[in-house]
Each structure stands twice: as structure tokens, then as C-alpha cells.
Image: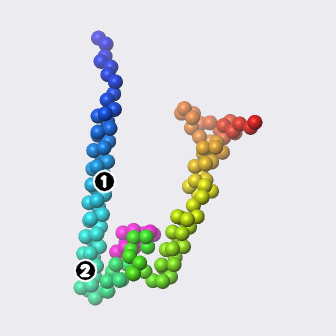
Amino acid sequence: MPKDRRKPSYKIGYKYLLNHIEELEERLDQKDDLIERLKFLYIETEEERGVDERTATREIYQTIYFDKWKNYIDGKFLTQEENEDWFDDNHDSYVCRSPYDENYLSMAQYETGIFDRLVNGQLVKAKDTIKFN
């Protein structure tokens, strides 16, 4: 008996994909709301124990966002030196971006064949992919 071979319905897959994206966006919104509520609760409890708002806010942002906490906190809670460090870090990453930056450079090396790569499931050596005219 022949098997029933149907073409896959891409419309159904597309609908599932859109629903999944909506669910993920909703979860991210819920996560952001939860983080905001926790920040305010922590700051209020620290103020009750005698810690000022500035110190409590800095602590919670450092705990949640680790190394990138300066990108999320309001500038009024940063010292002048931290504000200048934040500007230097972000200036380098936003204004001075070029094709020779670390991420772009490694991608370019793979695309041009400087590194070994997989082609059709087989490892192709870099020297085999480079053609000279």
C-alpha cells in the first residue's frame, strides 16, 4: 500500500512560528516586569534597614545585570568616573565599529575560507577553498 505523501503546509508552520514569537515576547515582558518589581521591593527593604536609595539601587543593578549594569541604571546613580567609563565603553562599541572588529573579523575569516569549514557535511581544508587567479 503506497504511503500518503503530502506536501508540507508552510502556512501552518508560519502560524505556529508567529504564535511562538508572541509567547516569547510576552514572557520577556513578564520578565522585565518582574525585574522592575524586585528592584523596587529590594530598594524599599534596604531603605527600611538604613541603606540609602542610591546604594540599594546600585547593588540591585549590579546583581541583576553583572558587568553591563552601567548600561541599565539611571545616570544619577553613577559617579562621575563610572559615567565616563560607561561613555568610553559604549563609544567604542557604537561609533568605532568596523569590519575589522573581533566579531566581524572572525566571520569574515570563515566566509573567505581562511579557516576550515564544513561543506555538505565534510570538513574542507582552508587551502582547498582559496582560489588564486
Q: Say which element carries label 2.
A: helix
Secondary structure mostly seen in magenta is helix
Query: In the shown orientation, is residue 53 left or right of residue 111?
Result: left
User: Which callout, 1 or 2, points to the residue nearer the camera?
Assistant: 1
Q: Earlier in the sequence, mark 1 or mark 2?
A: 1
Magenta highlight on residue 60: yes
Residue 71 position by quadrant: bottom left
Above or below, 53 against 22 in this view is: below
**Residue found at the far top of this picture:** 1
Disc 1 residue type (three-letter): Glu
The quarter in which the C terminus is drawn is top right
Q: Please report the residue visible at 31 percent of the width from the left and 33 percent of the height from the top.
A: 11
Write the start and end of the magenta stretch as one range.
59-69
The percent coordinates of residue 84 (x first, y second) are 51, 78
SS under mark 1: helix
Q: Amino acid at mark 2?
A: Glu
Q: Position of residue 130 (x, y in %)?
A: 69, 39
If the image is split into quadrants, where does the N terminus sit?
top left
Q: Quadrant of residue 69?
A: bottom left
Q: Tell me if mark 1 has few (under 14), some (14-19) or many (20+) residues whose alpha carbon lies within 10 angstroms of its own.
A: few
Q: Is residue 10 above or below residue 19?
A: above
The reply to whether the magenta stretch includes residue 61 is: yes
Q: Which residue is mark 1?
A: 25
Q: Name which residue lies at 26% across and 75% down.
A: 40
Question: Where does the image place residue 125, in percent across and percent down from the top left?
Answer: 65, 38
Instruction: Please give the label number shown on residue 1.
Output: none
Q: Is residue 3 above or below residue 38?
A: above
Residue occupying the point 32% across, 19% down: 5
Check disc 2 and report the residue beneath it.
Answer: 44
